[in-house]
Amino acid sequence: MRDVENLPEIPPELQGTVKLTTFDQLFAWARKRSLWPMLFGLACCAFEMIAAAASRYDIARFGMEIMRPSPRQADLLIVSGTVTKKMAPQVVRLYNQMPEPKYVIAMGACAISGGPFKEGYAVVSGVDKLLPVDVYIPGCPPRPEALIHAFLALHARFEHERIRDIKAYQKGVDDGVPIPALGPDLVDWRRFEPLMEAAGEKEAVHG
Amino acid sequence: MAETPQEAVQLKGIPQETFQALQERFPEAVQPARYEGALVPAEKIVEVVRFLRDELGYIFLSNLTATDYLDVKGVEPHIDVVYHLFRMQGGYAALHVEIPREIGKAHLPSVTSLFPSAMLQEREVYDMFGVKFDGHPDLRRLLMWEGFDGYPLRKDWKEVYYEGETKPYRSRYPKGGHPIYAEELSPLKDNIRYPEGWSPQAWDYDEADRLLYERMLSAHRDPDKPLKTDEMIINFGPHHPSTHGVFRMAVRLDGETVRHLEPVFGYLHRNHEKIGERNTWIQNIPFTDRLDYINGMTNNWAYIVALEKLLGWEVPERAEYIRVIVGEFSRIVNHMLAAGFFSNELGLYFTGSLYALEEREHILDLFEALSGARMMFNYMRPGGVRYDLPEGWLEKAKALAYERIPRKVEQMAHFLLDNDVVKARTMGVGVLPPDVAIASGITGPVLRASGVAYDIRRAEPYSLYDQLDFDVAVRTHGDAYDRLAIRFDEIWQSLRILRQVLENIPEGPIVAKKPSHRLKVPAGETYGRIEAPKGELGFYLVSLGKFNPYRYHIRSTSLLNLTALSDMTRGLKVADIVTVLGSIDLTMGEVDR
């Protein structure tokens, strides 16, 4: 924000023709109007996500009408429903396959914490146990308006985001989140630090 | 445990003449069961089921599940496997088999040779109780993965966040005031538990899928193939735009031809049944909303029908009218969405669905005015419904049902059914013969599109359906096109029903008794079912006369309708898999529960 205020003044003869901004601002402006959500429905909330994309709520107004089923073509993961232990490896794998910079919305009570099914033996207690989450929307399921609110919250975040702070544009290689495995229960490799190498081997096996 | 007089038992759960015929044929073997139906020794079960099917006309094995009796006063610990067999016209026969609880000793003969509908249900019982079925061709876990520690629905198996046997938990009621974070209950501070001494390095992580791939490679091999070709296995899903959620199909392909398809379940297994046994009777109503999340209203209704059977309550007439109204509106929503998503599967991307979603919004407005929620209604109560119709509701409903929806349905039916591309993609694809459909436990529009006029609203009328004038829609080809077309036929019948109930709804009370959150249900068991939009939705409930169900089993329509998926797709091309799947119409929330 401060950078925008410090911009040099535009000479009077060029006003209306030239506009000065920062690269961060330009980048945020462009990205705000072109988010690519992934078509990824898990449970009940997926229907409210579909309703948000349909005629009455129409998220095309926010520059995002096309949902891509392929993670390679998406930069927004809407976790719309209960993440079960059996599904957890796939959720993480899809997230890892998305190009940076990427964002995650945890839609609904189940994605936030496990929701009504938290006590269940096969339910992950919130997708943030697996992935970094940017926006949480409560509700069971949240109304489409709430989902749109989440998009606006994400837009507001872009305004304040600086490119140099985005992890993907920094030096070093990001290996992504280690993909959990199915043992006698869900095995999150981050719990077993010394076994991370074994996780790498497993990844080679499963592709 | 309440006393169970023998005379009363004989009359419940099995028709008198069926029971007598069974006892004549199997004099020593067949006894009256604890609550309902007949008790059969494990070694006789196949013979008894065959006798019922071939000689007494019970051609439909609707439900197969088990109950773990442990720590019940006056009952030896055992596992009780229960079969619900139906005739096409009215009434069921419940069969019980009592087997020991110990893993290894808990086994009984499989009835899959008689009823393919037992295929998935026996796998589920094996998964949840550890009961082995001798002679089952493919006994793998259904909902959890191979290698998962324990059999969750056994009464001595506790989940990680275990706080107490039944709700309300002491920490919240009646004293309350001490919120317990579920994570605090677990040593690992998460919903995770490993067996003692378990080593993550020594574990074989491929075990989860090994049996599946062995099955994929061995099933339906053709050794005499004239041209030797390599076959490959591909996985469809669990993340795929055309699988209606998180459904996975492993497909073995020869070129583009499907040689074998194996559905893989459990990616949305949310433990409804374990949670349902902890919940109070009333607490289960909102959970039913989340089963088939398109049709919250009919899910509520099926549970309530089963519960009212146990309670023996009468329902006021106005409440029955309201139930029929919301139930039929729900059917319209479901069938329009089914047709819309089917067109999506055929490659129309989102266009067809948009027509359906537009009408869905209008009907959801009605439901929201009624219950306060768009999807999770939590609307029905034992003995009635939660809220009365708000002012002006009927007028809005009439305007929708008389004018808008018929116009839109006609338009949509024209776009889809008279469309040459749709015809070319669907006609003659995925044919389901009627005998296979019945034996596989398939119900609802999928069964009726195969030429079987079986509708529970007619076969065993509940609520007002015996007084209403409507036809059972039937189509005869049993292909994907007929399964699409019959949904429109049924919408017309639903509109016909709506016309009758919207005009004649009486004034009066909407609930029989003062609602109570601590509802005590008399000891007993029952199987209650309704014709949900997708087919027969049943609830098997066991009560010990307490505030919570002892067993709460959901007979899932969508799961049973997938029994024949493998046979329906064999020999088709890859692109036809989604055509067949889309024409069946499933909701993963209900498939996996």
Image (cartoon, rainbow, N blue to C red):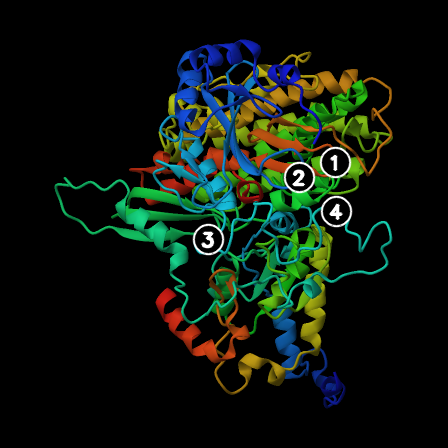
How far is mark 4 from mark 2, CA to CA? 17 Å
Q: Chain of mark 4?
A: B
Of pointers 2 and 3, the one earlier in the residue sequence: 3
How far is mark 2 from mark 1, CA to CA? 20 Å
Residue of label 1: B546
CB under 8 Å between discs 3 and 4:
no
Q: Chain of mark 2?
A: B
How would you rate the neighbour count of disc 1 (Cα within 10 Å): few for under 14, some for 14-19, many for 20 or more? some
In the picture, the quarter occupied by the N terminus of chain B is top right
What amino acid is found at the position of numbered circle 1 in the picture? Lys
Residue B38 in the figure: left or right of residue A113? left
CB under 8 Å between discs 2 and 1:
no
How far is mark 2 from mark 3, CA to CA? 24 Å
Of pointers 3 and 1, the one earlier in the residue sequence: 3
Residue of label 3: B145
Residue of label 2: B288
**Closer to the eye: label 4 or 2:** 4
What amino acid is found at the position of numbered circle 2 in the picture? Thr
Label placed on residue B167? 4
Of pointers 4 and 2, the one earlier in the residue sequence: 4
How far is mark 4 from mark 1, CA to CA? 11 Å
